[in-house]
Image: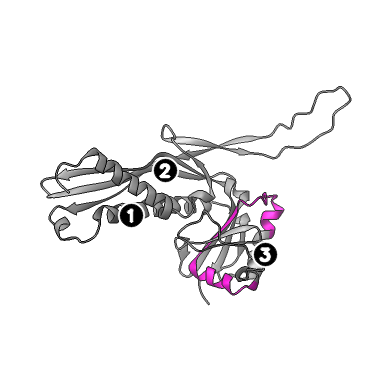
Amino acid sequence: MSTKISSSFIKQFEADVHLAYQQMGSKLKDTVRYKNSVQGSSTVFQKVGKGVASQKARHGLVPVMNVDYSPVECELQDYYAGDWVDALDELKIGHDERRVIAGSGAYALGRKTDELIIEALSKTGAANDVGNYTAVLNKETILSAFAKLNESNVPDDGQRFAVVGPMQWNALLSIEEFSSSDYAGDNAPFLKGTESRKWLGINWIMHTGLPLNAGKRECFIYHKTAVGHASGQDVKTDISWHGDHAAHFVNNMMSQGTCLIDETGVVRIKCKEAA
């Protein structure tokens, strides 16, 4: 890589980062509401209340539902993931350093995206908790969470998701209805780079970034519309030469934010990390 980088090289590098981010970076981005190209430091997601159907008199006016629209603000923050590429090191490297750095930056930004989404899920109230920290994840706890979603009239429209840790995934595999293809569906096709399965009409995902404190794990079942993710600047890359370092600095950046829109659409599962 010379000290003068062509614009076509930078564009190709940015395309590599963007592709890697979309394919491998975030596991949860497609499981929540998404708003792109946000102008300004924040945006608003609408929380829509439930309407009520009523009768009307003959030739009378159709009654208005007066559905409540509650705006939920989502603030955006800037995040960066950069690294140095030494000019002389490139002479000794036998692989494509551009793709290595692109993939590393994409993974870092993807982890931050998932971290923000999990942080929003964690804001749900205690009234939406099931299970306890003294027992590992089991079928009874899962069915309690499933019932809580149904009691809250959360739509069963294929957009319910569950995210669990590696140990909880192993516990699920010990449940015949989850592990057997006679009960569970195929892996969710849009969830790439992670373990996923469909059971009880819920898309189950394994994730390593869920809250864990002193052996106490938190998992979540939620509806896609319950959490919002906004992007003001999608993944962008800047490459610059620094003569004092004799190296290029590759900087990946994005502006994103998340918010909890409707906590009734999120159930927190509290469980013990391991037996």
Looking at the image, can residue 37 be seen? yes
**Nearer the observer, 135 or 166:** 166
Instruction: Find numbered disc 3 in the image and state the secondary structure of the residue it sits on.
Output: helix
Q: Quadrant of residue 15?
A: top left
The tag earlier along the polypeptide, 2 or 1, is: 1
Span highlighted in magenta in the image: 147-176
Q: Do the residues bearing badges 2 and 3 touch, measured as CB atoms within 8 Å?
A: no
Check disc 2 and report the residue beneath it: 256
The tag earlier along the polypeptide, 1 or 3, is: 1
Q: What residue lies at 69% left-to-right and 34% top-to-bottom?
A: 67
- On residue 40, the disc is none
Crowding around mark 2 (Cα neighbors within 10 Å: few <14, some 14 to 19, many 20+) is many
Check disc 3 and report the residue beneath it: 143
Looking at the image, can residue 136 be seen? no
Q: Is residue 272 magenta?
A: no
Marks 1 and 3: which is nearer the front?
A: 1
Residue type at mark 3: give it: Leu
**Nearer the observer, 145 or 191:** 191
Residue 201 vs 141, above or below: the answer is above
Q: What residue lies at 35% left-to-right and 54% top-to-bottom?
A: 108
Residue type at mark 1: give it: Gly
Q: Is residue 6 left or right of residue 111?
A: left
Q: What residue lies at 20% left-to-right and 53% top-to-bottom?
A: 85
Check disc 1 and report the residue beneath it: 103
Q: Is residue 172 magenta?
A: yes
Instruction: Find numbered disc 2 in the image and state the secondary structure of the residue it sits on.
Output: strand
Q: Position of residue 232 (x, y in %)?
A: 41, 37
Q: Position of residue 105 (x, y in %)?
A: 32, 52
Instruction: Find numbered disc 1 in the image and state the secondary structure of the residue it sits on.
Output: helix
Q: Position of residue 22 (x, y in %)?
A: 42, 49
CA separation, marks 2 and 3? 34 Å
Residue 180 vs 116, above or below: the answer is below
